[in-house]
Image: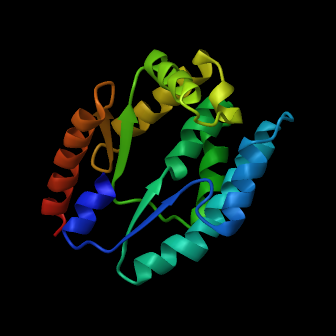
Amino acid sequence: MLTGDLRARGTDIVVTREPGGTPLGRRLREAFLETEETVAPIAELLLFAADRAQHVELLIKPALAEGRTVISDRYADATFAYQGAGRGFEPETVSSVIELATGGLKPDLTLFFDVTVERAIERMNTRDGQGGTKNRMDTETAEFYAEVRKAYLGIAEREPERFKVIDANGSIEDTHRKMMEIINEFLARNS
């Protein structure tokens, strides 16, 4: 919905995701998310870093150099939340790995679609019942997701200008409206 709105305004957009925004990233995503074997936490951290490094160098930086807008479903904040808080890595370790993978490239704006842990689990279960595919990260405990959510909210507290929280417990339309208010304000400030 966001990309449709922005493209209607004439914005040149590249839409991507992590993991999986490049051919190598898609293979890493498949290997990581669809494996049934236990993945060591350090392997998880480094796999995401490898994907991100490839993503930044071969997709994001070239698009930005062309003056295009990049919209990515997840980026480095996800590593702070999932591998840092969720897996228990020290913030300094996670920061070093992210810095190495991104070369310091940060988004101008990050949107966090916040839902309660209970609602997130309910939605995952509904998605699974509607033919959606479940991956390894979907099987984590409620405690894991609570730590991840807490980490995201901590980032929002530390970086309120860049990191915006959207209450996404309501309908898709309601969430989209809230998101567009933030986007419109951001664009007005930065145009």
Residue toward you, 119 or 43 = 119
Q: Quadrant of residue 41?
A: top right
Query: In front here: 191 or 115?
Result: 115
In the image, residue 44 sits, relative to residue 72, either above or below, namely: above
Which x, y percent locates residue 81?
A: 55, 37
Q: Where is the C terminus found, in terms of image quarters?
A: bottom left
**Is residue 38 shown left or right of residue 191?**
right
Front-most of 106 and 175? 175
Residue ID at (32%, 59%): 3
Taking 82 as reference, is 99 above or below it?
Answer: below
The x, y position of residue 25, in whole percent, is: 67, 61
Q: Which quadrant of the figure has residue 133? A: top right
The percent position of residue 167, horizontal first and vertical second, equals 29, 30
The residue at the point 24 percent across, 37 percent down is 173
Q: Is residue 170 above or below residue 5?
A: above
Answer with left or right where residue 187 lies relative to residue 15: left
Q: Is residue 115 left or right of residue 57?
A: left
Q: How is the image coloured?
A: rainbow
For image coordinates 67% across by 46% down, the residue present is 93
Looking at the image, the residue that sits furthest to the right is 37
